[in-house]
Image: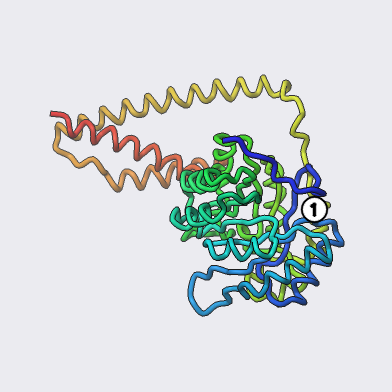
Amino acid sequence: MKFESILLPGVEAKRPIIIAGPCSAETEEQVMDTARGLASIGIKIYRAGIWKPRTKPGGFEGVGEKGLPWLKRVKSELGLYTTVEVANAKHVRAALAHDIDILWIGARTTANPFAVQEIADALEGVDIPVFIKNPVNPDLELWIGAIERIYNAGIHKIAAVHRGFSSYDKKIYRNLPQWHIPIELRRQMPDLPIFCDPSHIGGKRELIAPLSQQAMDLNFDGLMIESHCNPEKAWSDAAQQITPQVLEFILESLVIRDTMQTTENLSALRRQIDELDNNLLELLAHRMRVAEEIGWYKKEHNMPILQTQRYDEILQNRVQQAIEMGMDGDFMKTVLIAIHEESIRHQMEIMEKS
C-alpha cells in the first residue's frame, strides 16, 4: 500500500502534528470558546465528538447532527480544520455534507469489520483523510484489516491513532498502551503516519504529558488530545480533558529528538545485544530439550503434564528474582508464561507419540 500525505494546507510538516478539541461538542458556545482558545495557541485541526458511543444506554451520546453546523462555524470564523468520529454510512454522509475535513473511526467501530466496510463503501470516490483508531482489543490484524478496507475504497490519505487497549486489569491507565503493537504496525507499514491519543490511554489529565513524551520518543507523527474550555464541567470524559492553556504548556515542554541522527556510535552496543540474543536463544533451546526429557519421564511413569504446584513455585520465585535484579515483575511473568506454554506444547507432542 502506498499512502498519500495527510497534511492539509497550512499545517506544518513537523512533529508533532496536533489535533485537539473537546471529547464532545456540547453547546455552540462551548464549541466556539474551546476553538478560540486552541486557535490562540496555534492549533490548526479541531476535533469534537458529535456521535458518542457509550458502553451503557442512558449516558450522553452526543448532540448528533445538530452539532455539525457549529463545527462549520469554527471552520469559517477561525480557519481551523475540523474532524469528527463516524461509525456508519449515515454519519459519513452528514459529516461530508457539512464540509468536515477529516474523519476518524473509533476503537469500537474498528473492532467491527461490518461497520468499517459500511464506512468504506460510503467513502468510495471521496478524497478525504481518514484516521483509524486501534480496536478496543489488542488485535493488530484487526487494526490492519480496517486500514486495508478504507484503503481499498480509494482513500489513501490514512493515519493510525493509538489510543490504547481495554483490559480488565487497567492499573494506572484507562487503556493499556501496549506500545509494542503500534511499533509492529509501523514495522509492517513504515509509510503510515501514526498518532497517539494520550487522553484515552491515560484517562487522567495528569498522564497526558508523560504519555505524549513517550509517543514522541517512539517517533510518532502526531498527537490527538482532548481539550475543553472548562474540563471540570465537561459532559463526557471530564477527567481526561485539559484547557488550551495547559495543552500549550505540555506542547512547549515536549522534547522532540532528532530522528535523522547517525547511529554509528551505537554499533558496538548493538553487537552486544546481538550476542546476548544469540545466547538467550541457545539457552531457551536447551531449556526446551530438558522440558522434552521431563515429558518422556512423565509419559513413561504415567504422570500428568501439568504440575500446578511446581509451576506456581517457578512463577513466584522467578518473578521475585527478576524484581531483585531490577526488572519489571509483570514483564518477567509474561516471559515465563510464554516459556511454560511452549514447554507444555513440547510435552504434549511427546504424549501423543506412540
Residue 330 seen in this snapshot: no
The type of residue carrying mark 1 is: Leu
- Left or right of 311 in this view: 11: right
| Quarter containing the N terminus | top right
The residue positioned 48% from the left and 50% from the top of the image is 138
- Left or right of 314 in this view: 199: right
Q: Is residue 238 above or below residue 41?
A: below
The residue positioned 63% from the left and 75% from the top of the image is 63
Q: Quadrant of residue 290?
A: top left
Mark 1 — residue? 251
Front-most of residues 191 and 163: 191
Front-most of residues 218 and 329: 218
Tell me where residue 189 appears, x and y as whole percent.
58, 36
Colour convention of the picture: rainbow
The residue positioned 63% from the left and 59% from the top of the image is 202
What SS does tag 1 mark? Answer: helix
Tell me where residue 231 appears, x and y as whole percent.
72, 72
Front-most of residues 22 and 90: 90
Tell me where residue 159 appears, x and y as whole percent.
63, 46
Q: How many marks?
A: 1
Tell me where residue 285 appears, x and y as whole percent.
38, 25
